[in-house]
Amino acid sequence: MARVLNSSYSEMVEKAQEIFWLKGFKGISVKDLSAELDISHTVLYNKYSKDMLFLDSLDYYTTNYSDPFLRKLRESTEGLESLKDFFYKLIEALLDKTFPRSCLMVNTVVELRNENEDIVKRYDEYLKVLRDSYLVVLEKAYHIGQFKNKARINEYADFLVGIIFSMSILYKIRPVEELHSYIDEQLAFIV
């Protein structure tokens, strides 16, 4: 007997986001996705789509995970120490499985690159907000005298974006002490 839709669309998106986060977009078929969501695959085909659920999952991730994390970073006042705290908290979230398989957006960039225009828009916006958040903190760090060369702020922001991608791999193979040392060493480049 075909299953009917027993949950709201927002509940389905939340659950789909967890599935995509763990398995990736390509790592789950429509049939398996419908089984995990406990809905008929015909409902998924006719009323929704895997693509639609994935896009809404990315939006859910941004709203519920990355935006609050980055808002707190932007509101911080300790400059470079705020960045250190941000990355240490990221390490903690990666290791305690708050982020079950790295950053969903980083995973999406790596898995899907430029395969879907709507997905590219999502991760481009995510990377812009991430970079802009770093710029806010770097401006504060400059104004409190933590580094002298204001002309390098954009370069530093780009550099910090790269750390997110590095952490998505390193946390899987390095102990926490080495991850903290890595962050400390990277932030020491900001002079």
Image (cartoon, grey):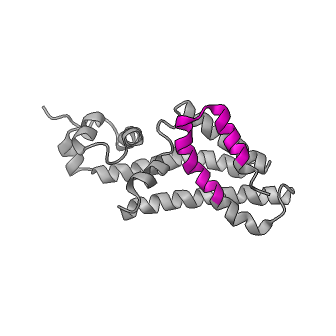
- Residue 130 is situated, as x and y percent measured from the top left of the image, at 60, 55
Q: Which residues are magenta?
A: 159-185
- Residue 140 is situated, as x and y percent measured from the top left of the image, at 79, 57
- Residue at the image position 21 percent from the left and 44 percent from the top: 43
**The image quarter in which residue 144 lies:** bottom right
Q: Is residue 182 above or below residue 1?
A: below
- Residue 190 is situated, as x and y percent measured from the top left of the image, at 76, 56
User: What's the magenta bit mostly, secondary-structure-wise?
Assistant: helix
Q: Is residue 132 visible?
A: no
- Residue at the image position 65 percent from the left and 49 percent from the top: 71
Q: Is residue 126 above or below residue 41?
A: below
The C terminus sits in image quarter: bottom right
Task: Check residue 143 for magenta coloring.
Answer: no
Q: Is residue 31 above or below residue 159?
A: above
Q: Is residue 191 visible?
A: yes
Front residue of 150 and 133: 150
- Residue 95 is situated, as x and y percent measured from the top left of the image, at 56, 32
Q: Residue furthest bottom?
A: 151
The N terminus sits in image quarter: top left
- Residue at the image position 64 percent from the left and 38 percent from the top: 179
Task: Check residue 176 for magenta coloring.
Answer: yes
Q: Residue furthest left?
A: 1
